[in-house]
Amino acid sequence: MINIDLKGKVAIVTGAGRGMGRAMAIGLAKAGAKVTITAAREKNELNAVVEEISLMAGRDAVHSMIADVTDESACLRVRDATLDRLGGLHVLVNNAARGHKYIHDANPGVAMDFWTADTTAWKMIIDTNINGPFLMAKAVTPHLLAQKWGRIINIGVTPSSMQKKRNSPYGVSKAALESETLIWAQELAGTGVTCNSLSPGGATLTGMVYGKDRERAGLNDPEIMALPIVWLASELSSWCNGQRIIAKDFDTTVDPDDAARKSIAAPALTPPAGARATIR
């Protein structure tokens, strides 16, 4: 089993009330990090995660906030509260997202072709999934640059999900997030701050999966995100920038660097020549 010590590190995990966000927040706390967890409105879910982390690591190890990542002032409040309450900031996990359930619920019974999509729901998903990570990253990056160390981790999906029929605007938004990851990684190169994406590697049992799909066999367990997020948040990942890690391929029984190298996937988008980090 991989054992990585994150004592002294402080992370923000957005969308942390359930599913992958919850699993990653708990994983980071188990490794010794302090964690700010956020959600747009699910206070009861956040409270449950706070209790889990408090029992394991103490109440001082976790801070929770209701914060909408599409609101720049809320993102700044999350940054400032994290620095004030937890004494530092080193890692941002951009996990908060909205799925095509919102398109379905806005227009039930109608096939989710792009031309039938509810415009308000479309804009909400795009705003959350593209602008949200940007606003959070914009808020924290000056601090990370000033301390010459930091990790920005964007939670992605498989290339097939970005291209699948009737999966817009969710697929559209996640393709844009992959582009953000590649561009930001280039701009951060050499600063001590890295930007990578982490994907579960297929459909995962979260709030994104609804209706009869929740009964489908073969769904990933959100817990597969815990160890790769800990590795990405650690000193060990300093060589990794602009990469796409697949959580289900992260072998927990081998050396963490070997596990990481084996779980790196081809980019969902083809980066410019020379843009990808050299893997030593």
Image: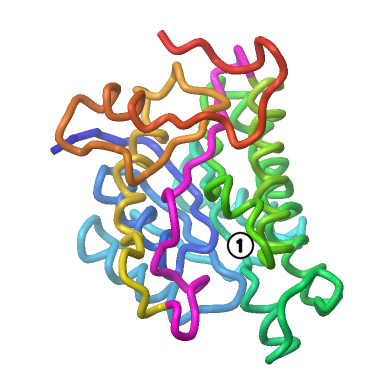
Magenta span: helix, strand or loop, mainly?
Answer: loop
**Between residues 215 and 98, which one lies in front from this camera angle?**
215
Place of residue 267 in the rendered image (x, y in percent of width and height, measured from the top left): 57, 31
Q: Which residues are magenta?
A: 189-213
Does any portion of residue 155 appear in the rendered image?
no
Q: Is residue 228 above or below residue 193?
A: below
Q: Is residue 87 visible?
A: yes
| Quadrant (top left/top right/bottom left/bottom right) for the N terminus | top left
**How many other residues sit within 10 Å of disc 1, few (<14), some (14-19) or many (≥20)?**
many
Residue 80: horizontal and vertical position, in percent?
62, 50
Instruction: Report whether 176 appears left or right of 210.
Output: right
Closer to us: 72 or 158: 158
Amino acid at the residue labelled 1: Ala
Q: Is residue 13 magenta?
A: no
Residue depicted at x 57% and y 50%: 160
In the image, is residue 236 above or below residue 73? above
Residue 134 spot, x, y in % from top left: 72, 46
Q: Is residue 1 left or right of residue 134?
A: left
